[in-house]
Image (cartoon, helix red, strand yellow):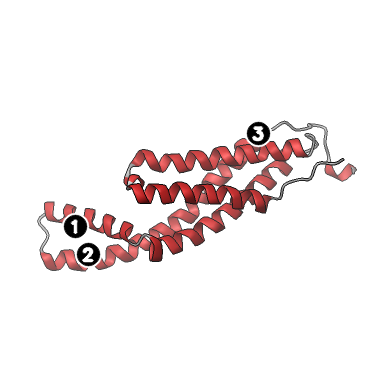
Amino acid sequence: MEQKITSHIIKGLFIAIILIIVNVIGQLTSYIFEDWYRWIGTAIYVLSIITSTIIFSRQNHQNVNFGILFTHSFKTAAVITCILFLYTLVSVYILFPGQIDHFVQIGVEEAKKQGKTAAEMQEGMAIARKVLVISFLAGGLMINLITGALGALLGAAIAKKNPNYHPIQQ
């Protein structure tokens, strides 16, 4: 009986759910504002992409090459990125709008230290909110794609493959 190959969409959905759970735990415990906690999600992301690549190689009985492994892994990362982008939209506007306020408050405290007036701080807060939302969305998108590409490269390099395999021969 031939083993069924798990789709990159299923893997991406599963990994994204794990990353969302890690983020929600961080939001609820306020650890999300700690530098060390942010690295946990990144480590889980990269390790899960590598694991996904190894599983894909095993499911294909190592009859894959670097390009096939990288392509499958990057498609998985793209699915994760899309889901996390949608989650970030919901998170910033609906679930945890307070995280923007937290970062704005940090900016206000810095402005007070610099001796800014109340009017300058008020104007800066409005601009800061817009910039932070755009930074969360665009930055999250780019960071997730770059991290996914890194995980895909590492996974394709680590996973066992048949160096003599050429898909055109089949």
Dot label at residue 157: 3
Q: Which residue is mark 2?
A: 124
Q: Is residue 65 visible?
A: no
Q: Secondary structure at mark 1?
A: helix
Task: Find the distance from the CA under tag 2 to the CA under tag 1.
Answer: 8 Å
Q: Do residues under tags 2 and 1 come within 8 Å of each other at their CB atoms?
A: yes
In the rendered structure, which amino acid carries the disc numbered 2? Gly
Residue 109 at least partly seen: yes
At 42% from the left edge and 51% from the top edge, which residue is drawn? 24
- In what quadrant of the picture does the C terminus appear? top right
Which picture quadrant has residue 131? bottom left
Circle 3 or circle 1, nearest the eye: 1
Q: Residue at x 56, y 37 (%)?
A: 47
Q: Please say if 170 is above or below 135.
A: above
Residue 73 place in picture, x, y as percent = 65, 45
Q: CA distance from mark 3 to mark 2?
A: 47 Å
Q: Disc 1 marks which residue?
A: 108
Residue at image location 76% in from the left, 45% down from the top = 5
| Front-lying residue, 69 or 27 | 27
Element type where label 2 sits in the image: helix
Residue 36 percent location from the top left of the image: 37, 38
Q: Amino acid at mark 3?
A: Ala
Q: Nearer the viewer, residue 3 or 8?
A: 3
Q: Is residue 116 above or below residue 32?
A: below
Disc 1: CA contacts within 10 A as few (<14), some (14-19) or many (>=20): some
